[in-house]
Image: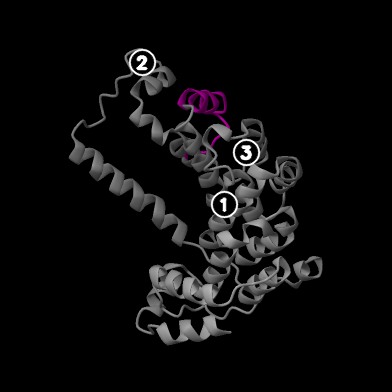
Amino acid sequence: MRLRAEMSAAADPAKAPGMQAYMKSTMPYYGINSPDVKAICTKVFADHPFPSCGEWRAAILELWRGAHYREERYAAMRLIALKRHRECVTPELMPMLEEMIVTGAWWDYVDELAHVVGDLLHSHRKEMRPIMRAWSQDPNLWKRRVSIICQILFKRDTDLELLYANIKPNLADRDFFIRKAIGWALRAYAWTDPKEVARYVQEHEGELSGLSRREALKNMKARPETLGERFGDPGGSDPGEATSSAARASRMRKRAAQELNPEMGRLGAEDPSSAFRSRL
């Protein structure tokens, strides 16, 4: 495939080991930065359009299953996102997405694919809602993570009943990626309705992990009146909160670093599972 030839030509062996170590990946890297991966994909995909949804899907699966370098799987996900194939993104794509989520089994793949699942949920709620309910109770933690975070970008269109229902069976889970997902999903909705998220956190105080709770309430710091209501301070004051913009920026940088580092600490599965292939 021409895409692999282009990536091989752009490879940087000096960068590749560091990228692989950073992502804790068993699959090696070419050593190509994200902007260059995007440029290669844009060029190759423009020169080789796919006349049918079947050919488009086959190309995605060939890239994914045949990948020897992680950037090839990033290319497969970019191919899914191409606007000219938007009509191909229907619930019939779910077996393929499920395979990619389960065999990818690491946050850089899964969180990107969660947006595709979210798009399907947004446009095909009747078909997708039962699938997300089932995924929320699946033994596979990555499918459960997707069921929780797939509405991250929905804002006022968030199906709260579905979100809470998908969180519920995972409240006792001790896995970092599930606890983080719960807090992340709640925090995203807090931009739309902070009082509702504060209410939910208070109601489930004894069930939410400390990580989920902290994540859920992060955005509240921009809304002191909501924090005040949440913690019983009618004035909404927070004496320990620094007021200078420099202090706030410093805290944001520290929090970002704390959020990033734990996600690098575990090894994701890389081996495709043949169990999914017969279903596609």
**Distance in Å between CA atoms under marks 2 and 3:** 29 Å
> Which span is picked out in magenta?
194-210
Q: Quadrant of the N terminus?
A: bottom right
Q: Which of the image's four quarters has the C terminus? A: bottom right
Lower sequence index among marks 2 and 3: 3
Is residue 104 visible in the rendered image? The answer is yes
| The one of 143 and 100 positioned closer to us in this rendering | 100
170 magenta-colored: no
Give residue 233's mark: 2
Q: Mark 2 or 1 closer to N-term? A: 1
Q: Which residue is mark 3?
A: 167
Left or right: 188, with 203 as reference point: left
Prevalent SS, magenta region? helix
Instruction: Name the residue: 45% across, 67% down.
Output: 23
Q: Position of residue 175 (x, y in %)?
A: 57, 50
Q: Indicate the amino acid at tag 3.
A: Ile
- Proximity of marks 2 and 1: CB atoms separated by less than 8 Å: no
- In the visual, does 102 lie left or right of 149? right
Name the side, left or right, on which 276 lies relative to 240. right
- Is residue 201 part of the magenta span, yes or no? yes
